[in-house]
Image: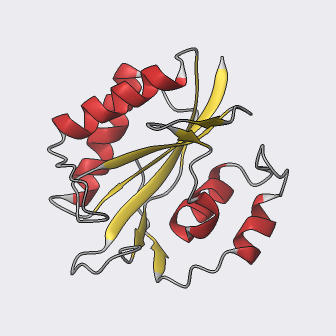
């Protein structure tokens, strides 16, 4: 069993309902999360959009392989009406990213683990710190506090008082 971290978020539709639906589908198709962060409200990252995103991070254990998890999360996104295009960042009902999969490092055309943008995104780092305050990245061994201090993301982020 590997410990994995999944980032979930979206800015279209009923955002909080979508977070709950994604958690339920992940529980059903991958594994029940050991920990779920609070939901964070954040500005769109990398593009302009009128609606802010809701984001959360899940920590779970699974025996499923990374490529299988990727297929499952793509199916969940599709079920949740995610429309993927090749034209960069855009609004979406749900985005699910494999942030970390144990200490495994994968770089392929379809999958990169750890997710390559983690250290640039406070909306991922803050929820990781919340659910695992002693977290260290498998690549550099940096502590989550160091990652947060070094992050250049200045986006507005607000922790919502909402339990999942």
Coloration mode? secondary structure
Please say whether residue 31 is visible from this viewpoint: no
Up/down of 73 relative to 48, above or below = above
Indicate the position of residue 105 as horizontal and vertical percent values.
68, 36
Please say whether residue 96 is visible from this viewpoint: yes
Indicate the position of residue 129 as horizontal and vertical percent values.
68, 58
Q: Quadrant of residue 63?
A: top right
Indicate the position of residue 102 as horizontal and vertical percent values.
70, 31
Up/down of 151 relative to 24, above or below = below
Up/down of 96 relative to 75, above or below = below
Q: Is residue 39 left or right of residue 49?
A: right
Of residues 13 and 99, the one nearer the viewer is: 99
Say which quadrant the N terminus sits in. Answer: top right
Q: Is residue 64 left or right of residue 3?
A: left
The structure residue drawn at horizontal position 80% and vertical position 68%, both measured from the top left corner, is: 146
Q: Quadrant of residue 25?
A: top left
The structure residue drawn at horizontal position 47% and vertical position 76%, both measured from the top left corner, is: 158
Indicate the position of residue 79 as horizontal and vertical percent values.
17, 34
Of residues 13 and 114, the one nearer the viewer is: 114
Q: Is residue 25 left or right of residue 42?
A: left
The structure residue drawn at horizontal position 76% and vertical position 49%, both measured from the top left corner, is: 137
The structure residue drawn at horizontal position 39% and vertical position 71%, both measured from the top left corner, is: 41
Q: Is residue 15 left or right of residue 33?
A: left
Of residues 128 and 70, the one nearer the viewer is: 70
Q: How many marks?
A: 0
């Amino acid at each position: 069993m590997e410990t994995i971290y999944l980032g979930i978020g979206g800015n279209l539709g009923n955002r909080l309902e979508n977070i709950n639906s994604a958690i339920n589908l992940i529980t059903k198709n991958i594994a029940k999360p050991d920990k779920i962060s609070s939901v964070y409200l954040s500005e769109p990252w990398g593009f302009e959009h009128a609606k802010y995103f809701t984001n959360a991070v899940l920590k779970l254990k699974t025996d499923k392989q990374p490529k299988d998890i990727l297929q499952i999360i793509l199916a969940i996104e599709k079920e949740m009406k995610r429309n993927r295009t090749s034209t960069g960042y855009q609004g979406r009902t749900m985005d699910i990213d494999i942030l970390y999969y144990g200490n495994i490092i994968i770089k392929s055309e379809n999958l990169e683990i750890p997710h390559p943008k983690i250290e640039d995104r406070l909306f991922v780092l803050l929820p990781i710190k919340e659910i695992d305050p002693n977290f260290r990245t498998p690549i550099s061994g940096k502590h989550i506090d160091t990652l947060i201090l070094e992050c250049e993301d200045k986006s507005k982020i607000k922790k919502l008082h909402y339990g999942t």
